[in-house]
Amino acid sequence: MTAFTHKFRWLIIIVTWAIAVFFAFQIPKIRIDAEIEALIPHSMDSKVNTDKIEEIFGGSDMIILMMSSPDILADSCLERLQRIDGQFSALPAVERSLSLFTMKEIRGEDGALVVNPAIPEIPVTSREREVLREQLRKNEMVRGVVVSEDFTLAAIIGTLSKSTDDAELLKSVHNIIRENPGGEEIYIGGYPVVGQSITSSILHDITLLLPLSILFMLIILTISMRDAKGVLLPLSVVLMSVIVSAGLIPMLGWKFALVTVLLPVMMVAIGNNYGIYLVNRYHEILRNEPEIGKNLLLEKLSHALTKPILLCALTTIAGVLALLTHIIVPAREVGLLAAIGIGWALIISLFYIPAFLAILPKTRIKTTGDKPHISRLEHFLFKLGILIARKPKLVLVLASLITLLIGTGMFRLRVEGNTVNFFSKKDSVRITSDMIDKNFGGSQTISIQFEGDIKDPDLLRRMDSYETILKSQPGVGQVMSISSVIRIMSKALLDPGDPGYDAIPDTREGVAQFLELYSMSGDPSDFEQLVDFNYENAQMIIRINDSNSSAVLGLVEGIKKITSGDPQVARIGGIGLVSAQMTDSLVKGQWRSTFFAIVIVCLLVMWIFNAYKAGILVLFPLGVACIVLFGIMGWAGIPFDPATTLITSVMIGCGVDYTVQYLWRQRSEIAAGLSDSRAVVKTLYTTGQAITFNALAVMIGFSPLIFSSFSPIRFFGLMMFISIFICLIGALILVPALTLVWHPKFLTNNK
Amino acid sequence: MKLFLLIPLALFLSPQTNPREIMIKSRDQARVSGMESRSVLEIHDGKGNTRVRETSMASKLYADGTEKRVIVFLSPADVKGTSMLINDYPGKEDDMWIYMPALRKTRKIVSSEKNKNFMGSEFTNADLATENPDDFTYSLEGTEKIGDQTCWKIKLTPATPALAAENGISFKTTWISQSDYVPRKTVFHGPDGTPVRELLYSGIRLMDKAKNKYMVTHMEIKNLKNNRFSIMDMPEAVLNPQVKDEYFTLTFIEKQ
C-alpha cells in the first residue's frame, strides 16, 4: 500500500480534491424541508389516512392570524381587522378563510330565520358595541373560533391549498400587516409559520454550528499537534468528508431536514480521528527515529495504523448504519450519509494523508534529551489501573449500583414529537401556538372520515353523539361536523319546544332540506371541509389543544372505542395524529436502531477478535452506557425527540472504538508476557491516554451543538458529550475490571 | 380651453354612449310583466362532480315596481316541494320566505347580504335580481366584440363602500350588445381588484317583439378562484302578464 501511495501520490491528491470539488458544486442544490411530514415514512397509517382524507376534503394546513387588543370590538381594531381580512382572503394560497367578517350569524328570531354576517356593521358607539358583543357571545359559530371568549383576541383562520409556498405566503401576510399599520399586536401561527421558523433556524444553525465545530477542531488540533501539517491534514480530511456527505444530499434527491443539522458536526467530530491518529503516529516515529527515511517512515506508519484505523472506522460505520432501521426518514438518511462520510474520511486518511506526507518534507521534531515526561493523566490512569487490578469485583459492583441508580430515571423518560415544542418557551412560535391552544381550540387537528349516505339521519345522530362525547374529553378544543351544522339550523328554524328543535331531523328529506337551506345562506365552499360535494363522505374535525403525543394517542384510542362497530367510520387521520404517531414511533425507532447498533457492533467485534466472548464483553459497557444515558435523560427531563433518538446509534458507533482499542492493546501486552493485572495497568496508562484524548476530541467536537436554535439538537449535543464520557469510563474502568474477573480466553490465547 | 370644448360635447352625448342609460335600457328590456318558466341549475364543483336542481318559477312585475317570484323545487326527490317566495321591492330590502315540506313549516329569511349564493351555486342572488341604477357609477370603457356581437364594455363601480361590501365586489365589467341591449358577459372583481367570477350569457330569445323583450336562456358562471362553475338553463319559458296573484302567497308555496 505504501508503494502504491508513494507512486501515485500526485494522482491521489488531485483525484481526492477533484471529487471534493465535484461534491462541493452539489451543495448549493440542497433544499431545506422543515415539514413534519418530511420526518415520517409515507407508509405510516396515520399519514396514509390523512392523505386520503385531504384528497376528499382539501388541505388541512392552516395559517392563523391573531389580533390582540384590550377590546377587540373597538372600531379601530375591527376596521383594521376587516382590511387585513379582505386582503388575506384574496391571497391565491388561501382556499377558505374564517373570520368575524366572513362568518355568519344564523338564528331564529320572531318566526324568521335570520342570516347575517357575524358583524353586519362595525359598531361606533359603546351601546352598539355591547349589542354586538352580546350577539357574538350567543353565536356558537364564531365564539371560541374566531373571537376569544374575553374579546381580547380575534382570529383570521386561512385553510391553505396543498401547493402553497409557505415562504411566499408568509411574505405576503407580513406585507398585508405592514400595509395596514395599527396599535394592536398581530401574531401569526399555524404549521407554515412553524415550518418557516424551522427552515430559518436550520439555516442559522448551519451557518453557526459548522464554522464553530471547525473552530473547536482547529483549537484541539493546534493544541495537540502544534504544527501546520498536523492541523491542516486532518482538517482537510474533515472538510472533504463534510463536503462529500453534504453533496450527496441533493444527488440522492433528499432534502435537509431538522436532524440533518447533526450531519456536518458529526462528520467534524468523528472524521478528524483518523487523521489525528496518523499524524500523531507520524510524529511519534519521527521522535523515536529522527533520521528515518521518508519511505520507511510511511511504511511504518501504514503498517502500524491501517488495521486499527480500519477497525475503528468500521465499528463507527456499523453503529451509524443501524440508523437505517430508524422509523424517521431523515434519521435513516443521516445514518447512510454519515456512514459514507466516515468511510470517505477513512479512505482519504489512509491514502491522501500518506500521499501528502510523501510530498511534504519531513517534520523537524524538537528533541530535548530529557527523560520522558509523565503527564498527570498518565499518572492518574496508572493509579486507576492499580485500583482496578486490586479490586475488580468491587469496581463492578459499584458500577452496577451506580448504573441501576441512575438508570431508574428511565421510568421518567418522555417523548416529544411536537415541532412547536422544539422552540424555547419565549420564542414567538411557541407563544402564538399556546395562545391558539388556549383561545381558539388548538392548531392541530384529528379527523374522522365517515362514508355512506351522509344525509341518513341515523348516521348523523351517531356523529352527533360522538361529537358530544368528544367535546367533553380533555385536550379537545373544538369539534366540528356536518351534524353540528344541522343542529344549528334546527335551532334557527324551529322554536324551543318544537319537536326537532336542536336535533337531527327524523327523515332524510328533512336533512336534505336543511342542507339546501344552509347552502342558500352560506358560501357553497363553507361545507367543503365537512362534507363532500355528493354527500358521500363527511369529516369530523377535532381541534386539539393538548398536542402531547400520549394525550393525542389516548384520544384516538378513545375515538376508536366510541366508534367501534360503526361501519361508516372509514378512517381516522389528521396532522395531530400524524405528529402523535410519529412521536410514538420515535421510541420504537430508538429501541430498534439501538438494538441493531449493538448487534452489528458486537458481531463486528467478535469478528475482529475472532471470539464470541469479545462481543459479549463489549455488550457490557455499551449496555451500561445506554442505561445511564436514558437514566440521565429521564432525571434531567430531556425527552426522546427526532434528534435525541439518534444518540445511541452514534454513541455505540463511536464508543465501541475505545473498548476495541483497549482490548487490542491488553491482548498484545498479555501476548508480550505480562500478567493480566499488569497488562491492565500498562494498557491503561498507554492506550488509555490515547483513548482519553480521542474521546475528548469527539466530546468537544459535538459540543457546538449546544448553540443550536432547536432543543432537540441542543440536547443531542449535550447528551453526546455525556454519553461519550460514559463510554470512556466503560472502556477504561468497566472493561478492565471485567477482564480481570472473567479472564476471557481470547485475550490470553495469543500468549 | 379643453374643458370648455368638452362641456358642449357632453351635452350632445347620445343615450347610446351614456353608460348609465345603456344599463337602464338593458335592465328594462329584461323586465317582463309576468313569466312562467322551468329551469335546470347544474352546480359543478370543478372536480367532475355535479348537482342538478330542477325548479319551476313564476314572476310578476307590479305597478309599484315590486317584482314577485315564486320558485318550487321539482328535483332531486329529497328537496322536492321546497318552495321560495321572493318579493323584490324597489328601494328596500327584499322579503324571502321558504317552505320546507319535511318540516311543514314556512320561515321568513332575513338577510342583508346580496352576494349570497343562489341555491348553493356560483350565482348570487344579486346576479339574478334587478339592479337599482343608483347603486353604481358607470364608465364606458370602449367597445369589444363578444362572439358575433359588438358590445359596449361598461365598468360598474358600487356607489358607496357599503354597497361594495354588500355586493362583495370592488367593481364589475359588463359587455352589453349594441343590437339588443342584452348582456353577453360580466366579470366581477373582488375587493382587491382581481377578477373573481365570470358570467357568460347565451341562448338569447326574443320573447316580445313589440316591446323588444329578450330572455337569456343559458347562463354560465365560473368562480375563477376555485374553478367551481354553475350553469342555468331555461328550457321552458313563456311570457304571461296574467300570472295569477295567488301564486305569490305563502298559502300557495305551502301547498306545493
Image (cartoon, grey):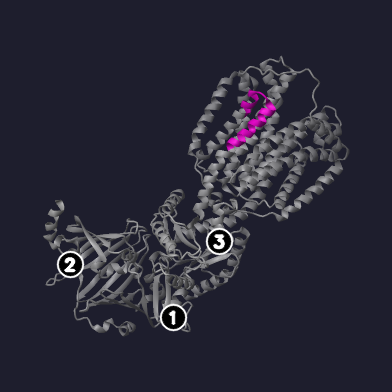
Q: Residues within 10 Å of mark 1 (few under 14, many from 20)?
A: many
Query: Pointer 1 and pointer 3: residues touching (CB < 8 Å)?
Result: no
Question: Which three-letter amino acid code belongs to the residue tagged 3?
Answer: Asp
Question: Which three-letter amino acid code belongs to the residue tagged 2?
Answer: Lys
In the image, what residue occupies the spot 61% across and 33% down?
A: A215
> Mark 1 and mark 3: span between their CA atoms?
34 Å
Question: Which three-letter amino acid code belongs to the residue tagged 1?
Answer: Leu
Instruction: Give the residues drawn in magenta, as a range.
Output: A210-234
> Mark 3 and mark 2: span between their CA atoms?
57 Å
x and y percentages locating residue A435 in the rendered image: 55, 60
Chain at tag 3: A
Chain at tag 2: B
Position above or below: A563 against A434: below
Query: Mark 1 or mark 3, which is nearer to you?
Result: 3
Inspect the magenta stretch and tell me whether residue A247 lies in it: no
| Residue of label 3 | A437
x and y percentages locating residue B76 in the rendered image: 35, 73
| Residue of label 1 | A494
- The secondary element bearing badge 3 is classed as helix
Which quadrant of the view contains residue B115? Answer: bottom left
Position above or below: B71 against B144: below
Asked whether residue A732 appears in the rendered view, the answer is yes
Task: Report the quarter where the N terminus of chain A lies.
Answer: top right
For the stretch drawn in magenta, what is the main secondary structure?
A: helix
Left or right: B53 as drawn, with respect to A460: left
The mark nearer the N terminus, 1 or 3, is 3
Considering depth in this image, is B150 or B12 the residue closer to the camera?
B12
| Residue of label 2 | B25
Considering depth in this image, is A698 or A737 the residue closer to the camera?
A698
- The secondary element bearing badge 1 is classed as loop
Task: Report the quarter where the C terminus of chain A lies.
Answer: top right
